[in-house]
Image (spheres, rainbow, N blue to C red):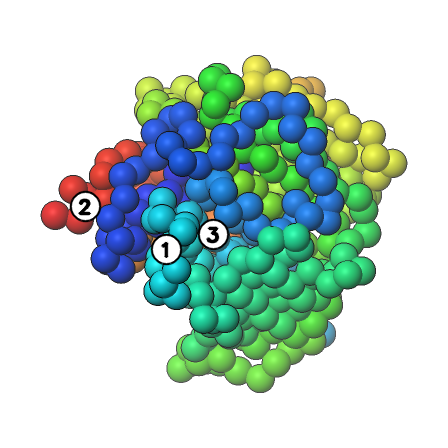
Amino acid sequence: MRHRVRTVSSIALFMFFLGITIAMPTIAASPGFAAVTPGQALAFPADTGAHPSFQTEWWYATGWLDTPDGKPLGFQITFFRSATGDDTADPSAFAPSQLIIAHAALSDPAFGTLVHDQKIARQGFGLAYAKTGNTDVKLDTWSMVRATDGRYLVHAETREFALNLSFTPTQPLLLQGDHGYSQKGPLQSEASYYYSEPQLRVSGSVSRPSHPTGRSGTPTSVSGVAWLDHEWSSTILSPDAAGWDWLGANLADGSALMAFKVRGRNGGSVWAHAVLRDASGKLTTFDPAQVDFVPQRTWRSPRTNTLYPVAETVKTGTLTWQLEPLLDDQEMDARDSTGSAYWEGAVTLKRGGANVGRGYLELTGYQKPFEFQNPTKAAR
């Protein structure tokens, strides 16, 4: 369930500042873009690559890293591809038919807060692209490439930190929803194509912030476990949606849990869904009535004054999961570029007081409910 409305809003604002004017997409698939429909079989490895006929797409990796000093880290890196609606037949190399956007973040308890960075560019000139046929996305010096053996190679270097990681699959792909057709609302059109790769084995290095300057320090060898989502669509959520809570978790026994709740503007639930795959591959799915996120403890951001439920109880049927953050301050403050802020961070999972896994929690729409409007009007 990743960045759906926030990404559309961010892309719209970025497009405006780049001099690209488009209309915001409607609930149904925007004219000229491919639609998500049930019953469409996904094919691999081709579908690990880009789908340029759809409006929005992202590759999203999160995970926990173990360092030699025994102090855990959380990380996130996301690459977005967005079709602008510009004429694809335009032969100009400067034609802005696709945008590539990337976010990266590191949660380091020693630093006490989340550090993050973001980039954006028009696709072209070999500097920014999302290729078809296999995962191969690049933005300047940041990249995510899927090798022929299924491993992912990830590189991102910022002023404050750097990620040089390899993700090795240990389990089959997890097709979300109905064989990859993932409904996000009561309407059939409110959906995406969505699969996950949980329980990825991580190796590589991380350069952590060096105190007190905040600049990137020397590389530290790391190992760990990651979760990768790949999702594409041409739609946005219902106008009744205010935001969502989303969880992707790798459990210690080899199981994988994904759950989300789309919150309504009236405080209720627009839609919810969860899936639990045990280590043997058995799937258990949970319908909207069986899934809920219940706040247990809140944290207020000193930057945005936003109150986030950083500790929550997630209910999936008869199962109850307690979430606790690696650190409270894992807010992504992107107001200067996207006009919004959200909380996205590493969490531990407990059941009955016992640690059962680690994951990532995303909390959006708490700073302010999502607004759907033309980007040119929003920027005035």
Q: Mark 3 points at which residue?
A: 81
Q: How far apart are marks 3 and 2 (CA)?
A: 21 Å
Q: Give, as a three-letter code, the residue at label 2.
A: Thr
Q: What element carries label 3?
A: strand
Q: Distance between the residues labelled 1 and 2?
A: 23 Å
Q: Which of 287 and 87 is in front in this view?
A: 87
In the rendered view, does 378 fall on the left or right side of 109? Answer: left
Q: What element carries label 1?
A: loop
Q: Which class describes the residues within 10 Å of circle 2: few (<14), some (14-19), or many (20+)? A: some
Which residue sits at x=62%, y=42%? 248
Which residue sits at x=62%, y=72%? 164
Which residue sits at x=34%, y=23%? 240
Q: Dividing the picture into quarters, in which one does residue 149 lie?
A: bottom right
**Which residue is most to the right?**
280
In the rendered view, does 47 fall on the left or right side of 218? Answer: right
Of pointers 3 and 2, the one earlier in the residue sequence? 3
Q: Mark 1 points at which residue?
A: 90
**Numbered label attached to residue 376:** 2
The spot of residue 172 in percent (x, y) is: 79, 44
Q: Which of 56 and 304 is in front in this view?
A: 56
The spot of residue 101 in percent (x, y) is: 43, 58
Q: How far apart are marks 3 and 1 (CA)?
A: 19 Å
In the rendered view, does 255 fall on the left or right side of 38? Answer: right
Q: Give, as a three-letter code, the residue at label 1.
A: Asp
Whether residue 126 is situated above or below residue 200 in the rendered picture: below
Which residue sits at x=58%, y=84%? 218
Q: Which class describes the residues within 10 Å of circle 1: few (<14), some (14-19), or many (20+)? A: few
Of pointers 1 and 2, the one earlier in the residue sequence? 1
